[in-house]
Amino acid sequence: MDSYSGKITRLAEQFASLPGIGAKSAQRLAFHIVSMPEENVSALAEAILDARRNIRFCKYCCTLTDEEVCPICASDKRDHSTIMVVENARDLAAYEKTGRYEGVYHVLQGAISPAAGIGPNEIRLKELMRRLQSEDVKEVIIATNSSLEGETTAMYISKLIKPSGIPVTRIASGVPVGGDLENIDEVTLLRALDGRVPL
Ligand code: ZN
């Protein structure tokens, strides 16, 4: 890559550091950027910085949002007594796309993974426990992925909540083992939700 331009190489390396972008795509993007009108490149760069600087965690559910409280937590049309626990905002988006879930969410921003050194304190679990103490919650649905990390997290949370007496359920299998929720179709997601079992 060094044969044409150190600056293009540097740009391509930045793209290649993003998830899902290989060396070839990174190079293509870099060449595309330098051929774009400067104002479009400016708008792109500004959108990236603006998102990074101004998006924060919702005060209640910890999802990424522009506001202090996300639109779902702020809505009075949602059932605030049912909390679905998911690993990340992409999983939340997958369930929102089905249009059938009326409760609210709690986004852990990760899953417990002893192998990767991620313990209960590294995910947004304290925030969930705080919500359970201060809100009138009738059910916690654990919808972490069916990977080893997702299952470990589900078991951990269920044990933590048990003494409070709040019913905890786990979405049904049917979600393939190791499957990322965001890649699973809506029918499967709804079947998993409807078939949830007490933990
Ligand atoms: Zn929220």
Image (spheres, rainbow, N blue to C red):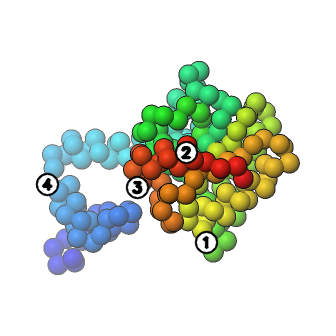
Residue ID at (23%, 70%): 24
Mark 3 or 1: the one toward you: 3
Residue 116: image tag: 1
* Distance between mark 1 and mark 2 Cα atoms: 29 Å
| Labels 3 and 1 touching (C-beta < 8 A) | no
Give the number of the disc on residue 193. 2
Mark sitting earlier along the chain (3/1): 1
Can residue 68 be seen at all in this image of the molecule? Answer: no
Which residue is disc 3 drawn over?
Answer: 183
Q: Relative to 13, is 125 above or below?
A: above
Work out how far the residue at label 4 is from the one at label 1, CA to CA, in angstroms. 40 Å
Counting from the top left corner in percent of width and height, residue 90 is at 47, 49
Would you say the residues marked 4 and 1 are in contact, meaning their CB atoms lie under 8 Å apart?
no
- In this view of the protein, which residue sits in the foreground, 157 or 138? 138
Quarter-wise, where is residue 26 in the image? bottom left
- Farthest top residue in view: 76
Quarter assignment of residue 149 = bottom right
- Calculate the distance from the C-alpha at mark 3 to the C-alpha at mark 2: 16 Å
**Residue at the image position 56 percent from the left and 61 percent from the top:** 146
| Left or right position of 81 against 23 | right
Estimate the x, y position of residue 50 in percent, counting from the top left: 42, 41
